[in-house]
Every structure is written in structure tokens, then in C-alpha cells.
Image (tube, coloured by chain):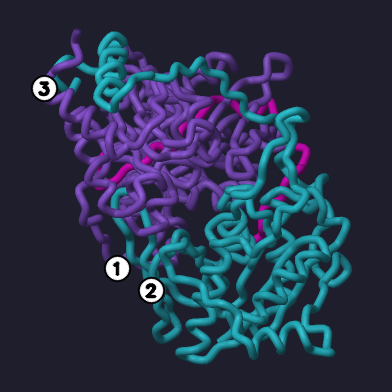
């Protein structure tokens, strides 16, 4: 059993701030982390490895710095790691990224299951997983909150707003994980030694030349979508503070204002 | 199967009409469909093209027929027993064939958990781009291309995305953001049935069952009044206070992500970038500091009230009325005044 997990190194967006003068993102000093949903994807694979035995291979596309994320995944218990990195891959949108990752996964080969996080916190697209599945011509189940392997099939409970669906799919297939799927483990001491103290180069780098990928379908030129412009959302509102000596005074004044604006009726609900 | 490619020098002028993919559950049309139709009408008018809605399902004629009463030009319904329940590949199979045949210029899909499953797979099969979770759509007045605006970096930045060389221009659209289509008196919409060529082996997944969510469904999207609690409510019991105010006002209970992550309340109450986007008439934020991820989901509310002990909390920058104070005192005062009807002066 070979499970490939796709992970992305992302800036911790909850720490990202906007420079109010230049209206640009302040990225200095913002830590890089493994994308949270991807950690759930990795945990799901490691759990299968613990219970049934499996080889867990982690794959990440990004700059050389993304090696850190792969080392962390190795420390958590993954067996092999591949960094997919090349200047030619820069500027890829989800189509181009999925094209490259699908080519890398084909190169690694012999997989039974691919698990991705549902979406990354920097782009929030949730598109790369399903696009990889299409390019590899395998079925997909997204938004997985429960997952169980059984006789060459996988049973997945997938979240939906109105109700959940339970699907059974034959392997090989691609699953995307949401945070409800599990709680990711921390790296073990043994794992940390193995990943960070090894003399061997544990992360194998694959470049454009290593992959069977069509150059017209990757990078900026191969991306069907482009960023036309980006801007910082501006919210300007005149805020009025409700003053009063007691909580009751403030409460009554607020309710009067709401009543005047026809948001509530006297005596309660609208 | 040969995979699709992008940038194949297609003739863009071959593509016409704005399409909306309807979403249904148990044969019922979901509100997101009307939101997409409302927005689709605006785009179709600006492009000088027709607006069509496509409804895949089984025994779906009656539900699809209801859409004819709205401001739309064509309602297609795709009728097949294998489309009774949701499956990624069943829906992608029929939709990709219809899109290739009829060539819409724009295709809008709801950014629901289903739309975000079908959308990217469909775009990948068609060989076109897809912009995820859009909150704004416009037609470029110069060259008529679709400008698709969406939040990124947790809502810290907005990006406008284009898909210049490939068709259709596809977007998933965030629920709760666009205004719903209206019914019109005299509709000339055509109503067309499509019988797709779909086989069981196309689907490649087996539906074992559906599990209804056991809680009473929280309807944040339709709520006129929402009272939300944040980290400042301190613990699980704090939601009793939030609930008391919501009940007194006849509103729903919302929450920031912090409370959901802390396990104080179910995620179905979560408002914000990773929760539900809401635009009620009145949003009362209690003990919510106003992280950008939360603001992304509620800043379009008509009136915002903020109650917080920290007068520098960012929520006060975007509220209409702010109260600096302890919610444990303010909320009971609000509830007793409402119940006594004492605020009418």
C-alpha cells in the first residue's frame, strides 16, 4: 500500500498584517507552516500506516524553502519526501500546479491512495486536489471527515452543508481532508532525529527535466487564469459609540437607536 | 482518455450565453441557485447575451419549472436516474458534454462543498480556468472579459482574476453574497429537457447513504438578525447569554472561529472566511475583536453593533454602533429592556 500526500508550505495567514501606509501584505517575520488541512491529510495517511501498514510519501511543490515542510512531515512519520521545484513552475495557477503535481505523482508511481488537504489557507481555492484527480483519471471524494479502508476500497464520509454523504470508492482514488477528519500528531523525538539529524539527503528534488510534463501547460504561460489586479479591502464606516453611566443606560440608548432605524420593534422581535 | 489542454487558440466568439449551474438537494433547488441567477442576469445584460440555468437531477422537471418564473432566458433540465444523488463524476460527465456542445461564455457554480467539488473537476476536463469562491463579478467595459474578484490570504487581500484565453470563464461564487433573482410577471423563458448519455460505470463511486445533520439547522444566510459570540464570551456557558439576546430579538446565533475551535459551539454557527458569509439587517458582535477573517464574513451586514471591553478592538472600526463594556452586564440589560419594551422613549 502506497499513499501519496500532497502538502503545501504556507504563511500563517492569521499572523499576516497589512501595512496601513503602503496597503501591502507584511510577510516579514510571518512563520511558514504546513497548511493545516494538509496536516490532516498526512495524519490520515499515517493512521493507515499505523493500523494496516503502508508507505507514506509526501510531495510538495514550491521553492527550496518548502523542504522544511517536508522534513516536518518526515519527522511526523512519513517515509519518503519529494520536493517539486523549478523556476519553470513559478507563477502556476491551480490548473498548472495540478498538471505538475499529477506528473510528479505519475513519476513516483504505484500509488493506491492520494490524500490532499481540502484547501490551503493562503489561496483558499480547494481546486488542486480535484484537478489532480482529473488529470490522473481517478475518482475523487472531497471534504472527507471520516475515512476507512476495506478490501481495496475506501469508505469516506464527506461533509455537505445540508447533510453528509457516505461514498465507497475503489482504489486508486484521491481524497481531500477537512479538519474534522482527525487531529494531527506532533513529530516524535525519534522522528525528529531521523528527519533532521540524518546525514543522508532525505528530500528528493524533482525538477522540470525529471517530469513528463507539457511545458505549454505550466507556469505563468500555461495558466488559464491570471491576476488582473490585487488590492486591500477598504472599509470606511462612521462608528458611533453608545455612552452611558450604567450598562442599562447603554442598553436602552442602543435599543432606541436600533428602533429608530426600524431594525427592531418596540417590545422585542421584528 | 486524453486529458484536456488550455491555451489552444480557441475562437472565443464561438462562445455565448451566461450559464448558472443549479444545485439541488432531494429534488429541491437551493437558494444559491437564485443568487447565481441574480448575478448571472447582470452579467448577461452587460455582455448582451442570454442567461441560462442548467438543472441536473432525476424527476427534476417540476423543481426546474419553478425557475421559469424568474428573470432568466433558458432553463435546461438534465433528467437521468443516475443523477438522483450527488456524484462528482456523474455530474461532471453530463455537464462537460453539454458545455462542449452548447459553448457558454461564462459558467457560474455555487462555492458550496458540492460546487467546489464539481467545479474544479469540470474545469480540468474542459481545459479552462476556474476562479474559486468569488465575492464580486463584473464585465470589463472595454473588452467584455469577466473580472472575478475574490479574497485571498484569509481575506487580507482581494484579487481580481481573469481567464483571457480559455472558455467558458468559470467561477465558483460564495453563498450569501449575491442578491437573489426576482420573479417576474411575464417570463418568456424557454424550458428545455436534456436527456444525457450517462452510464453507471461513468460514476466510479457508490453512494452508501446520507446522514442528515442532527442539530436543528442553523439558517444564518436567511437570518435578518444575528447575534454572534467571540473569544470574549470566555467559555461555553457564555453562549447562553448570546442565545438569550438572539431569542429576545428573534435572531440566530453566530460565532467566531475561535469559539468553534475551542469546542464551545458547533461549526454550523461559524461566520467568516472559513464559515458562512452573512448579510443580515442587524449583526451584533459580542466579544468579537474583529479579525479580518471574521470581518470577511459579516462586513456587508446592513447594521453592525459591537460590544467589547477593548475600545481599540478592530471591530469598532467597522461597526455602526459600539458599546465599550462587559457583555456579561450589557447583554442582560438589553434582554430585560427588550422584554419590558422599555426603549421606545
What kind of secondary structure does the magenta stretch mostly adopt? Answer: loop
Q: Nearer the viewer, mark 1 or mark 3?
A: 3
Query: Residue at 62% across / 66% down in the picture?
Result: A136
- Label 1: chain? B
Q: Nearer the viewer, mark 3 or mark 2?
A: 3
- Front disc: 1 or 2: 2
Q: Is residue A138 left or right of residue B157?
A: left
Q: Earlier in the sequence, mark 1 or mark 3?
A: 1
As drawn, is A56 to the left or to the right of B71? right
Q: Tell me the SS state at disc 1.
A: strand
Q: Colour of chain B?
A: purple
In the image, which disc is placed on residue B208? 1
Q: Find the magenta span and give its range.
A: B1-28
Q: SS of the residue at dot 3?
A: helix
Tags 1 and 3 touching, CB below 8 Å:
no
As drawn, B185 above or below B128 = above
Q: Is residue B250 left or right of residue A215?
A: left
Q: Nearer the viewer, residue A249 or B232?
A: A249
Asked if B294 appears above or below A252 in the picture, the reply is: below
Q: Quadrant of the C terminus of chain A?
A: top left
Residue position for label 2: A155
Q: Quadrant of residue B159?
A: top right
Check disc 1: other Cα within 10 Å, few if <14, some if 14-19, many if 20+.
few
Q: Quadrant of residue B63?
A: top left
Residue found at x 52% / y 18%? A237
Is residue B27 part of the magenta span, yes or no? yes
Label 1 to label 3: alpha-carbon separation? 52 Å
Tags 1 and 3 on a common chain:
yes
Q: Whole-percent x and y of residue B245? A: 23, 34
Q: Is residue B211 magenta?
A: no
Q: Colour of chain A?
A: cyan
In front of the other: B326 or A85: B326
Amino acid at each position: 500500500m502506497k499513499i501519496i500526500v500532497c502538502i503545501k508550505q504556507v504563511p500563517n495567514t492569521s499572523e499576516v498584517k497589512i501595512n496601513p501606509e503602503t496597503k501591502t501584505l507584511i510577510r516579514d517575520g510571518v512563520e511558514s507552516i504546513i497548511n493545516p488541512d494538509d496536516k490532516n491529510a498526512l495524519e490520515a495517511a499515517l493512521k493507515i500506516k499505523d493500523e494496516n501498514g503502508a508507505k507514506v510519501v509526501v510531495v510538495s511543490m514550491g521553492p527550496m524553502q518548502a523542504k522544511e515542510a517536508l522534513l516536518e512531515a518526515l519527522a511526523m512519520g512519513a517515509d519518503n519526501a519529494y520536493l517539486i521545484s523549478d523556476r519553470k513552475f513559478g507563477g502556476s495557477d491551480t490548473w498548472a500546479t495540478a498538471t505538475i503535481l499529477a506528473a510528479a505523482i505519475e513519476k513516483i508511481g504505484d500509488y493506491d491512495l492520494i490524500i490532499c488537504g481540502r484547501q490551503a489557507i493562503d489561496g483558499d481555492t480547494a481546486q488542486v486536489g480535484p484537478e489532480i484527480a482529473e488529470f490522473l483519471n481517478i475518482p475523487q471524494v472531497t471534504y472527507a471527515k471520516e475515512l476507512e479502508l476495506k478490501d481495496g476500497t475506501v469508505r469516506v464520509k464527506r461533509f455537505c452543508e445540508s447533510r453528509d454523504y457516505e461514498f465507497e470508492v475503489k482504489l486508486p482514488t484521491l481524497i481531500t481532508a477537512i479538519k474534522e477528519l482527525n487531529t494531527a500528531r506532533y513529530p516524535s523525538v525519534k522522528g525528529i532525529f531521523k528527519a533532521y539529524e540524518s546525514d543522508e539527503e532525505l528530500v528528493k528534488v524533482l525538477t522540470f527535466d525529471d517530469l513528463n510534463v507539457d511545458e505549454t501547460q505550466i507556469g505563468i504561460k500555461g495558466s488559464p487564469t491570471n491576476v488582473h489586479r490585487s488590492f486591500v479591502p477598504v472599509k470606511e464606516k462612521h462608528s458611533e459609540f453608545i455612552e452611558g453611566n450604567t450598562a442599562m443606560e447603554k442598553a436602552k440608548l442602543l435599543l432606541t437607536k436600533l428602533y429608530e432605524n426600524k431594525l427592531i420593534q418596540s417590545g422585542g422581535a421584528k | 482518455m486524453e486529458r484536456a489542454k488550455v491555451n489552444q487558440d480557441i475562437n472565443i466568439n464561438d462562445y455565448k450565453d451566461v450559464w448558472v449551474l443549479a444545485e439541488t438537494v432531494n429534488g429541491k433547488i437551493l437558494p444559491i441557485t437564485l443568487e447565481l441567477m441574480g448575478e448571472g442576469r447582470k452579467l448577461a445584460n452587460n455582455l448582451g447575451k442570454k442567461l441560462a440555468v442548467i438543472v441536473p437531477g432525476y424527476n427534476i422537471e417540476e423543481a426546474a419549472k419553478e425557475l421559469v418564473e424568474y428573470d432568466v432566458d433558458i432553463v435546461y433540465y438534465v433528467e437521468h436516474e443516475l443523477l438522483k444523488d450527488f456524484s462528482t463524476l456523474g455530474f461532471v460527465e453530463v455537464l462537460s458534454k453539454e458545455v462542449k456542445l452548447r459553448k457558454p461564455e461564462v459558467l457560474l457554480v455555487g462555492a458550496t462543498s458540492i460546487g467546489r467539488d464539481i467545479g474544479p473537476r469540470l474545469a480540468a476536463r474542459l481545459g479552462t480556468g476556474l476562479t474559486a469562491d468569488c465575492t464580486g463579478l463584473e464585465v470589463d467595459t472595454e473588452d467584455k472579459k469577466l473580472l472575478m474578484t475574490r479574497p485571498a490570504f484569509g481575506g487580507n487581500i482581494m484579487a481580481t482574476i481573469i481567464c483571457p484565453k480559455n472558455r467558458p470563464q468559470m467561477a465558483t461564487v460564495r453563498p450569501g453574497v449575491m442578491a437573489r433573482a426576482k420573479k417576474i410577471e411575464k417570463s418568456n423563458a424557454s424550458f428545455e429537457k436534456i436527456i444525457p448519455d450517462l452510464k453507471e460505470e461513468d460514476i466510479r463511486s457508490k453512494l452508501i447513504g446520507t446522514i442528515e445533520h442532527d442539530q436543528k439547522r442553523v439558517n444564518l444566510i436567511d437570518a435578518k438578525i444575528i447575534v454572534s459570540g467571540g473569544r470574549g464570551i470566555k467559555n461555553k456557558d457564555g453562549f447562553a447569554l448570546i442565545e438569550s439576546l438572539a431569542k429576545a430579538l428573534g435572531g440566530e446565533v453566530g460565532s467566531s472561529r475561535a469559539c468553534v475551535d475551542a469546542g464551545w459551539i458547533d461549526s454550523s454557527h461559524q461566520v467568516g472566511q472559513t464559515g458562512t458569509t452573512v448579510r443580515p439587517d442587524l449583526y451584533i458582535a459580542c466579544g468579537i475583536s474583529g479579525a479580518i477573517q471574521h470581518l470577511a464574513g459579516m462586513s456587508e451586514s446592513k447594521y453592525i453593533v459591537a460590544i467589547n471591553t477593548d475600545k481599540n478592538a478592530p471591530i469598532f472600526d467597522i461597526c455602526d454602533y459600539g458599546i465599550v463594556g462587559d457583555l456579561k452586564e450589557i447583554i442582560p440589560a438589553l434582554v430585560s429592556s427588550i422584554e419590558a419594551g422599555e426603549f421606545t422613549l
